[in-house]
Amino acid sequence: MAKQEEMTLEKLAQMTQRGFLSVDKRIDGIEERMATKSDLEKFATKSDLRETEERLLDAIRGIEVKKRDFEALQSEVGELSRRVGAPEKKI
């Protein structure tokens, strides 16, 4: 069995320093991969996001109108079917 060397304050300081250097290198790697504020601004500006939001809201409003139109048409077809005595079909 190998004899353990005595732990000195100097050895402990060296171990701690190596640990911090290792962590520092890993943090540097992460920082290189992170996007900066300017990177994100190149991707989309606030005005771009507002425009996109407005286009989405317009599309949703259009879908709601088309749904109401469809429901009204469906009701009219049902009423005409009842008038002519045709069997009602559910969609």
Image (cartoon, rainbow, N blue to C red):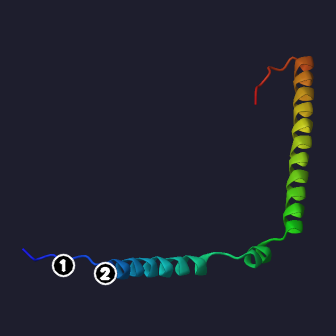
Closest to the observer: 39 or 52?
Answer: 39
| C-alpha gap between disc 1 and disc 2 | 10 Å
Between 8 and 62, which is closer to the camera in this rendering?
8
Question: In x, y percent, where is residue 23?
Answer: 46, 76
Report the residue at 16% width, 75% height from top: 4
Residue 49, picture quadrant: bottom right
Residue at mark 2: 11
Circle 2 SS class: helix
Q: Dot 1: what SS?
A: loop
Q: Residue at horizontal 90%, vertical 46%?
A: 61
Q: Which residue is drawn at 84% across and 20% down?
A: 86
Amino acid identity at mark 2? Lys
Tell me if mark 2 has few (under 14), some (14-19) or many (20+) residues whose alpha carbon lies within 10 angstroms of its own.
few
Quadrant, the N terminus = bottom left
31 over 68 or under it: above or below: below
- Pick the residue in front: 64 or 48: 48
Toward the viewer: 89 or 63?
63
Residue plotted at (85% across, 55% down): 56
Residue that numbered label 1 is attached to: 5
Q: Do the residues labelled 1 and 2 touch (CB within 8 Å)?
A: yes
Q: In this view, does 46 lie to the left or right of 24?
A: right
